[in-house]
Amino acid sequence: MKKIKLMLAFAACGLISQQAISAASWELTSGSNTSPVYGNGRTFTPATGSDPSSVNLTVTAFSATGATSNATSSNTGRNANDTIETAYLSIYTPSAGLGVVNRDGSNTASVAVNSSTGTDANEYVNNGSEHAMDNNGRSDVMLLTFTEQIALQSLKLGWSSGDSDVFILAWSGAAAPVGGITSQLNGKTFSQIAADTASDPANGWRLIDSLSNVGVNTTNFNTSAPVYSSYWLIGTGGFNSAATGGGVTSGDKNSSNNWIAFGSTGASYDYVKLAAVGGSKFTPPPPPPGIPEPGSLALAGAAFLGMVGLRRRKAAA
Ligand SMILES: [Ca+2]
Ligand SMILES: [Ca+2]
Ligand SMILES: [Ca+2]
Ligand SMILES: [Ca+2]
């Protein structure tokens, strides 16, 4: 009887679903700004010691520069009117990391490099004060595309100036979005991409977190009940889901814990460069050796019941 109890206890352990969590990080501090073009991508391999060591990350940049007006700090309609376009993903070595130079810096199809000719005098690659990912004027974002589904769980800013609020969204729609993932950004507004909610997870981008005053530290998020996705969006400021208005905010809150609108007292623009991200991949563990297969489990159960029956009959006799 003792032996059978032990077997059943082992079997129960084998039936409990377990998850094996691994950890990987990607350093985003190598590259150059030669020949900049809008819509460029930069691919990074996992840092030494990462597990898994084979998941690559490609980062691209976007900004809501699609409207012809509203390029400055006037924020009426900022989320509903400004449509998202590709931008230039800039890089600042050796330690600051990735920035975003958006299309407001140039009147032509060329990326503004040494000075701006466009509607925003500070969006240019070399020394422009908005060559970071920022939300002064427009809302810049970075799209992170991993070759496998990852729970993005940390980020490190290599540089920030002024304020450093950051939001994180994960794509929770189809694994292979129709038209590719960029079709879920290009031509849409931030209000439109905020349509997803926890109760409607198939709809698209879901807010994972809005982090306040990150600074040049490694900051963790998405740790309890982690969300896994191949596609992640990181932007500056805070983010409202559709349920709370939809779109990018200053990331700053008033004493009533409500977002302060851009341009209002207490709202600060955020300027950051992204130096590293970290995450984990869900890997189901192999079954431990020596645990009976479900088939033999059923046999053990039948044997146990048979023995109980035998004992009962003996007791009754
Ligand atoms: Ca910028
Ligand atoms: Ca800007
Ligand atoms: Ca802040
Ligand atoms: Ca802010």
Image (tube, rainbow, N blue to C red):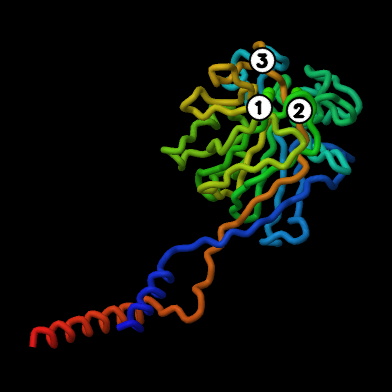
> Mark 3 Cα within 10 Å, few/some/many (few <14, many 20+)?
few
Provide the secondary structure element on which disc 2 rests: strand
Q: Cβ of disc 2 within 8 Å of ligand 1? A: yes
Identify the residue at horizontal 84%, vertical 37% (top origin): 36
Asked where in the image residue 257 lies, by quadrant, the reply is: top right
For marks 1 and 2, the one nearer the N-term is: 1
- The reply, left or right, for residue 184 in relation to residue 95 is left
Label 1, residues with CA under 10 Å away: few <14, some 14-19, many ≥20: many
Ligand 4 near label 1 (Cβ, under 8 Å)?
A: yes
Q: Give 193 or 85, whichever is nearer the viewer.
A: 193
Q: Which residue is mark 3?
A: 266
Which quadrant would the N terminus be assigned to in this image?
bottom left
Residue denoted by label 1: 237
The amino acid type found where label 1 is placed reads Gly
Residue plotted at (61% across, 25% down): 248
In the image: residue 143, left or right of residue 31: left
Residue 136: % across, % down: 73, 21
The kind of residue on which mark 3 rests is Gly
Give amino acid for label 2. Answer: Tyr
Q: Earlier in the sequence, mark 1 or mark 3?
A: 1
Q: Which residue does the numbered mark 2 point to in the structure image?
A: 271
Q: At which x and y percent is residue 134? A: 74, 27
Location of the C terminus (image quadrant) = bottom left
Q: Look at the image and tell me whether residue 89 can be seen.
A: no
Percent of width and height locating residue 93:
87, 42
Disc number placed over residue 275 in the picture, else none = none
- What count of labels does the image hold? 3
Residue at x 43%, y 71% (from the top left corner): 14
- In contact (CB < 8 Å): disc 1 and disc 2: no
Residue 69 appears in which quarter of the rendering? Answer: top right
